Image (tube, rainbow, N blue to C red):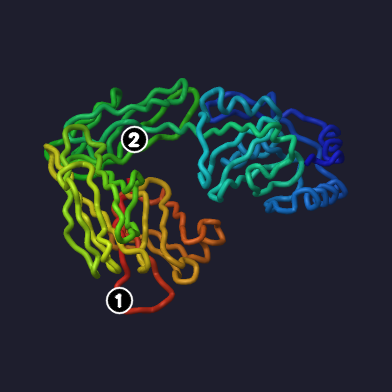
Amino acid sequence: MKLSSKLVLVILGMSATSAFAQSTPNCTSISSHASYQLPLTTDQVNSINQDQQNQFPSVSVLEGPTSSYNCHNYAWVKSTGGSTFWLNTPGDDAFWTDGSYVSTTYSSGTSDVRISYQGDHTAVTTYGSNEAISKWGAWGLYRHQITYVPAGYLPGNPKSYYKRNTPAIAGNDVCGGVTFSVPNTPPGNSVSWSSSNTGGLSINSSSGSATRVGSFEGYVTLTATFSGSCPHGPATKLVKVGSPSLIKTINGVVAGTTPVLAGNMYNLSATSNTVGSTTFSYNNYSGTGNMTIDLYSPSSPNTQMYVYSSSTSGSRHVRVNATNSCGSYYEDFVFYIAGGFLMAVYPNPVQNELTIEAQAVETAVESLVLISEQTGQIAKEATVKDLKQDNKLQGDKILLNVADLPRGTYYLQLITKEKTDHPRERIRLLLQ
């Protein structure tokens, strides 16, 4: 499939004008590759729309034909809040050659990944399965399957993938002392450090060397502030100070509340980001219904859990304790026999996006709320209707953005359409 010859003539007939200064996030100038084009006529717009309907009827049209910007501008500039203009090749190369973006791999459903097609085209992935959004020359802005594009964009189907190289703080949680750094500090920038609670965690402003103060126990936010000729916003990291942090996985996947099947074996694992020796222990301590389990090697970081074949209903909590020289910390695995209305929530702890799975979400659930443990108030609420409109509901899976919430502990609760006096299950979440 090819773009219509009329569109090619439109592009060739455009007159370019000098654009104002443009640059990558790492301040590499792309001004020499930026231009403005003559606007499309009504006849040209109508012709493009007809060609799109004839050649690509399955795309979702997000914006109609326009010559004000192209695919490169949308992917690298406009989609991140920048201005619109025509970005000519090879100007888009600078976004990865100067380190603003770095090479990555793509898994279906991973959003905000840039796809560079060999056929001089760029797209941005969405939460949808193998789905992207891109601008097709002077044609419209479309949501489409990644390979559902003009054949000229995919000669032999090779593609490269890139993600934003956002400055990030590296360093472990703190029991004694840890030195923090920003391995991908933007070129030409220096870093200064600060702690949100100097009474709990002190940090050297220039070296990044941090030390626990006294017997402080809790969370502290570290901030790396950048200064240099190319300005960048600060980077932050929530650090656990004192007793060890805890990361739980089930069959190698970070998860919270998890459905299980009778007669099956599950691999449970606990690790910590806290420097120093940490020991772990598991305890099968509470449950409902007739669900019965066995734990093997409960004093090891890795254990196996067997669900008895006679189990038909109910749930079990498995508590895992982590202990180091600064103290102990615990969290619960929650398992339930598939078939009940309970949630699977992951990852937990979470940074930016939370995945929530429950049976018959669209028909049974009205909304969800996140309640702050610190204030007891609702910190975030979303209806299933709004989530569906925002493309955050995929089957029985909800994608909830929590990046805008203060770091700390929250409780997630689903509000079902069926009114009942029975308390709803709450899932304890840690935002870090």
Density class for disc 2 (Cα within 10 Å; few <14, some 14-19, many ≥20) is some
Number of callouts in the render? 2
Density class for disc 1 (Cα within 10 Å; few <14, some 14-19, many ≥20) is few
Is residue 200 found left or right of 123 in the rendered image? left
Task: Give me the residue at 82% from left, 48% from top.
Answer: 51
- For the view shown, which residue lies furthest in the top direction? 188
Residue 92, visible in the rendered structure: yes
Is residue 131 found left or right of 406 in the rendered image? right
Task: Give me the residue at 76% from left, 44% from top.
Answer: 139
Is residue 75 found left or right of 364 in the rendered image? right
Position of residue 208 relative to residue 303, above or below, is: above
Residue 333 occupies quadrant? bottom left
Residue 258 occupies quadrant? bottom left
Task: Give me the residue at 60% from left, 25% from top.
Answer: 94
Residue 422 tag number: 1
| Foreground pick, 119 / 302 | 302
Q: Amino acid at mark 2?
A: Thr
Q: Amino acid at mark 1?
A: His
Element marked by disc 1? loop
Instruction: Name the residue that disc number 2 marks.
Output: 223
- x and y percentages locating residue 155 in the rendered image: 71, 32
Residue 391 occupies quadrant? bottom right
- x and y percentages locating residue 207 in the rendered image: 28, 23
Is residue 334 found left or right of 33 in the rendered image? left
Where, quadrant-wise, is the N terminus in this rendering?
A: top right
| Foreground pick, 40 / 153 | 153
Task: Give me the residue at 86% from left, 33% from top.
Answer: 13
